[in-house]
Image: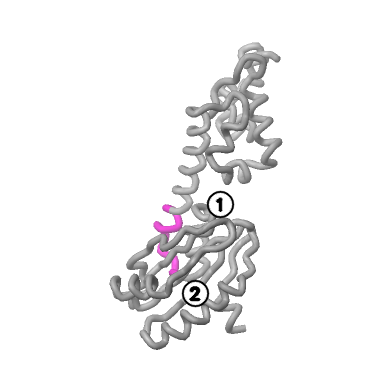
Amino acid sequence: MSKIKDLPEYERPREKALRHGIGALSDAELISLLLSSGYKGSNVNCISTSLLNTYNSLKNLSLSPLDDYFKFKGIKTSKALMLAATFEIHRRIVRQESESNNSVIDSEYLYNKYKEELLVMYQEVVIIVIVNSKNQISYENTLYKGNSTQVLISFKDIWRELLTHKGKGFYLIHNHPSGDVNPSEQDLFITQELLRESKTLKIQLLDHIIIGENGYTSIIKMIKT
């Protein structure tokens, strides 16, 4: 297997980027730049191609947990961390862009804000977002982490958060690692109970949304239709 230095200059990712700009590189070539080198018998382009052939896309590769990168020959700690860090930087940029624009706080806004973070989770995670009387986020917190199929939710914990932070309204957000955004019976029950109890406390449940690979579902909208 030829080494990178044995390839024609126009086929080398580094030289190609310097000559034509980083945007001229293919997905595999971008990964090659990150990994920098291969191992005896296989150059870095072969490793990058193998990664993308396995995951089918950059998106799928970015959603892979760190430990999975070690399964590929030639990828050890520093290279695996480089990949993971690059994808995490992207997720944080997306989240910061969402936070920096002055969009109205609603379910769509929260989906865009949290999707990059939640789509990489291989367990169910529940987040509470509390808003004030001006519909501005006053507090947000990850309440629970469960397993790949469910998470236990305590109503007392939710009310404690709301009363402690003097919320006027709140959103509940959780992911489905399976990608299916249809609510379970438990999801529907929890939402209906929160709606009922929130009326007593006069703190509005604005929505309970489920985030998955193909979008999100508003349980409140589903219940009301």
User: Which amino acid, mark 1?
Assistant: Tyr
* Residue at image mark 2: 207
Identify the residue shown where x is 28% and y is 72%: 164
Image position, residue 152 (x, y; %): 49, 66
Identify the residue shown where x is 34% and y is 65%: 139
Pick the residue in front: 180 or 224. Answer: 180
Q: Decide if residue 29 is on the left or right side of residue 135.
A: right
Q: Identify the image quadrant of residue 186.
A: bottom right
Please tell me how crowded label 2 is: few (under 14), some (14-19), or many (20+) other residues with Cα within 10 Å.
many
Secondary structure beneath label 1 = loop
Quadrant location of the C terminus? Answer: bottom right
Q: Which mark is residue 180?
A: none
User: Which amino acid, mark 2?
Assistant: Asp
Looking at the image, tell me whether mark 1 or mark 2 is earlier in sequence order: 1
Identify the residue shown where x is 45% and y is 57%: 98
What range of the chain is rendered magenta? 96-105
* Residue at image mark 1: 122
Image position, residue 96 (x, y; %): 42, 53
Q: Decide if residue 187 is on the left or right side of residue 113.
A: right
